[in-house]
Image: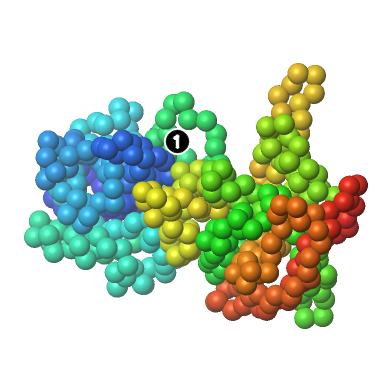
Amino acid sequence: MLCVRYGASRSSRRRRCGEDSWHCYVHKLRAWIRDDDGLPVRPYLMLVVSTEDGKFLSCQPGDTVETALGGNIAKKEPSSETVLNFLKRVMTHPTQMNSSAAGEKLAPSRPKTIKFADTKTAALHLGEKEKWADETACPYVQGCKDALAALGVEECHFAPVPPMFLENIIRGSIEPGMAPENQEYGTQHLPGLMECTDGFTPEFGKSLYAAAAAYVRASPWESLAARRPIQFTYRLVLREDVSMKLTAFGSVVGSKDAGSYGFSVHKTLETAMKAYDLEHTGDGEDEANAMAAGGQTCMFTSVYETPFEDVDNAELYGWEIAASDGDAPPAEENWPLFCKIQFEKGENGEQDTLSLTRPAIIELQCFELMFKGVVELLNGGELKSSGDAVRDAAGPWTVKAQTAAGSEKGETAEVELEISLPALTSDQAGTFL
């Protein structure tokens, strides 16, 4: 295992005498395990690093909660009491994780200083050391401070986690070891929108997720036929003196009853019609055939299939998720998964391939605006297309929507959308974007 050295080595005698410094990091792991009831949960890692010599410290698990039952892994967010019990056990029954013999027993010791951070505060005040001592955002600082002082720990305060430690040790070494051996690559391992999309800000994420949640609550599949193209035209302002007119075609995908639902976007009416025709003439393979038309999609899935970075950012910044149905936990379902789809049919007996990437900011803004436009017209009872009238033209309607694309401090811009249902005929051709 990699070893990060935070500072110069001290003798073991000085450590035992209480002159060492520890950094205790409580991290919500990007992995799923089963809890005692057999339900999937994301575990928490409690990791102690000796900043004097770079040792990763844990403890020999005890037999009771008070003696750190379970060691440094908790199946739910650990309380201050749990972290305190763990630290006591690290002092009295320490082991070293990053040694040639992982789990090597060490002599008992007590640090002079313990610094804390958790997942939400790991990057707080990086490079601003003067702010660390007064920061109380990490709950374990105040929650453990008095009890640690009674044990002889002289200082207890916050400190952020070095980014290289987080990436190289937590992400690169510990988390992969938590995954089941038979786990296949899935959408939960796609990069997060904030991490891979230029211009994606927390404020835009808040607006985009709120629009997606409103779309789910509006149940568009009750009023619109699956994959029926809806035309959206609006003007995109690139800067004060430059703008461009965009037209795209969105459509409802699936339904709640079918167990798969979302929204797709195509650049031309031709490809949108291809998806529509394949959906309704696909001989039982509707979804796979419709995917052959490519495009971009937002499918609503469970939290277990959502990229971990999106889940963490939604929790950190308060992005809205539509409440789950039935007995499912409130935030288990209806997570929007935005992807670009490229489908290639296998030839000569070769397997079909489907590649997924994340959309660019201008494409995500298109989803944001389309969701808002569709919801407003559905709520007003104007947007309908199903049954015998599914191919008939309707509209146009004008809707004004707010976009937060590029927003840093919550500012928004108003965009006027022209929305219509184009007549559906054979050999459709479209232009655009």
**Viewer-proximal residue, 296 or 73?**
296
Specify the farthest residue to the top. 349
Classify 199 as above or below 430: below
Task: Give the SS element for disc 1.
Answer: helix
The type of residue carrying mark 1 is Pro
The quadrant holding residue 278 is top right
**Viewer-proximal residue, 16 or 124?**
124
The mark tally for this picture is 1
Give the quarter of the figure containing the C terminus: bottom right
Q: Which residue is mark 1?
A: 176
User: Which residue is rendered at x = 63% and y = 66% of the image?
Assistant: 378
Is residue 203 left or right of 67 when viewed as pictured? right
**Viewer-proximal residue, 233 or 193?**
233
Is residue 338 left or right of 7 when viewed as pictured? right
Give the quarter of the figure containing the N terminus: top left
Specify the farthest residue to the front. 388
- The crowd level at tag 1 (other Cα within 10 Å; few <14, some 14-19, many 20+) is some
**Viewer-proximal residue, 166 or 253?**
253
Specify the farthest residue to the left. 150
Classify 16 as above or below 146: above
Is residue 240 left or right of 401 when viewed as pictured? right
Where residue 95 appears, x then y in whole percent?
Answer: 23, 36
**Is residue 177 visible in this depiction of the protein?**
yes
Where residue 199 appears, x then y in whole percent?
Answer: 64, 64
The quadrant holding residue 170 is top left
User: Which residue is rendered at x = 57% and y = 73% of the image?
Assistant: 408
Where residue 153 appears, x then y in whole percent?
Answer: 15, 58
Is residue 186 left or right of 325 when viewed as pictured? right
Where residue 314 appears, x then y in whole percent?
Answer: 47, 59
User: Which residue is rendered at x = 48% and y = 30% of the image?
Assistant: 183
